[in-house]
Image: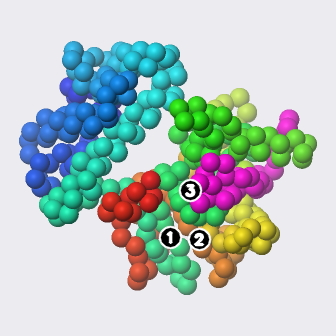
């Protein structure tokens, strides 16, 4: 939001976490909070180590001299010039990286980097957005993760919703399959993509099954390797075809029964593949299938998902759900009628856990 609207409009933006991180000695936010937030951003950018990264970061947020009131398009163009690349390439790659680097510095400055004394003065900045909740629905235990899907660690299988043509979105898109494709890509030391294994495996599956030029039935599930995600302990990706492209538009249709069907088939596939791995596949993580670009309401998605998970519950499975935002996690908890498990893990509010997860 700050990148888009610029420093001159900070006061008009809803920035509760930046305001909290910028509070000088406590969680109290004064009327001067826009200045405090700007100073926090300047400090975060100054910690990026100079070079094109720091220069482009200052330009991107309007922190460089003369850039405070410049439109977002001008700031993006000048930031791309700092890297000597096109605006479009900068938007798809470097800009996301820059904002991520700034965010990491803010997290450090606003919470875990301040040490124990700072942590006692100020609530953890990371707690609402990087946590997992141990829950119980009836006699079934599950873990609800609240963070981007690409931060999942040490879970055997991640499920991803795809369209019935099994075509993945481009890596720069914001969807779950795009994030997983991006995280699974093999890159060199400079970040350039050397291989796109998940996309290549899906194309190969379509070729072998003679569906290169036609869609598969809704509910089809296709397994692939996890590419670079293997370094995070993820061993398989299961692609559930639940979104049906609407002809002549950019829209999709998703039927709740297809979500339930795909979920049941995912569990069957997990059972079939389990023994082929050492140790056997056990843990599996589901996003809310069809609730992104598919347009399915989140409460409908989780209800359809849980209907199949409940029917296929087994003691040798470790079930995980992942959502990006705390409010959505609260909705999922409410829809499922879940209650906290007695040993629910704390939010990621310490430096050791943050480093282990990121």
Badge 2: few (under 14), some or many (20 or more) residues near its Cα, within 10 Å? some
135 horizontally vs 120: left or right: right
Task: List x then y, in percent, for residue 329.
Answer: 44, 61
Considering the numbered disc 2 on the image, is that residue within a helix, a strand or a loop? strand
Q: Are marks 2 and 1 in contact (CB under 8 Å)?
A: yes
Q: Position of residue 82 (x, y in %)?
A: 39, 18
Q: Quick check: is 247 in the magenta stretch?
A: no
Residue 331 visible: no
Q: How many marks?
A: 3
Residue plotted at (41% across, 15% down): 81
- Residue 320 in sight from this viewpoint: yes
Q: Which residues are magenta?
A: 211-240
- 18 displayed left or right of 1: left
The residue singled out by tag 3 in the image is: 232
Q: Residue 143: which disc? A: 1
Circle 3: element type? helix
Relative to 300, 66 lies left or right: left
Identify residue for label 2.
Answer: 319
């Amino acid at each position: 939001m700050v990148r888009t609207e610029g420093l001159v409009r900070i006061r008009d933006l809803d920035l509760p976490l930046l305001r909290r991180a910028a509070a000088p000695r406590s969680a109290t936010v004064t009327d001067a909070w826009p200045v405090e937030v700007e100073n926090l951003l300047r400090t975060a950018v100054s910690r990026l180590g100079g070079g094109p990264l720091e220069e482009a970061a200052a330009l991107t947020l309007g922190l460089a001299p003369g850039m405070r009131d410049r439109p977002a398009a001008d700031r993006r163009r000048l930031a791309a010039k700092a890297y000597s690349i096109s605006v479009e390439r900068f938007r798809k790659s470097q800009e996301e990286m820059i904002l991520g680097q700034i965010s990491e510095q803010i997290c450090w400055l606003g919470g875990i980097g301040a040490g124990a004394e700072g942590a006692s003065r100020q609530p953890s900045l990371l707690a609402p957005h990087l946590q997992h909740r141990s829950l119980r629905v009836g006699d079934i235990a599950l873990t609800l993760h609240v963070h981007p899907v690409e931060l999942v660690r040490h879970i055997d299988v991640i499920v991803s919703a795809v369209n019935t043509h099994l075509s993945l979105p481009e890596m720069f898109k914001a969807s779950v399959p795009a994030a997983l494709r991006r995280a699974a890509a093999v890159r060199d030391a400079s970040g350039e993509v050397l291989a796109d294994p998940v996309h290549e495996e899906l194309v190969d599956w379509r070729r072998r099954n003679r569906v290169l030029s036609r869609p598969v039935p809704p509910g089809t599930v296709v397994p692939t390797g996890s590419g670079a995600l293997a370094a995070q302990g993820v061993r398989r990706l299961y692609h559930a075809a639940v979104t049906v492209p609407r002809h002549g538009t950019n829209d999709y249709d998703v039927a709740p029964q297809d979500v339930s069907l795909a979920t049941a088939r995912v569990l069957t596939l997990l059972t079939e593949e389990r023994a082929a791995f050492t140790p056997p596949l056990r843990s599996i993580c589901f996003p809310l299938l069809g609730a992104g670009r598919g347009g399915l309401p989140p409460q409908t998605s989780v209800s359809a998902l849980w209907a199949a998970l409940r029917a296929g519950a087994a003691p040798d499975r470790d079930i995980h759900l992942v959502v990006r935002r705390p409010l959505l996690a609260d909705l999922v908890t409410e829809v499922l009628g879940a209650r906290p498990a007695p040993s629910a893990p704390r939010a990621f509010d310490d430096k050791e856990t943050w480093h282990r997860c990121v």
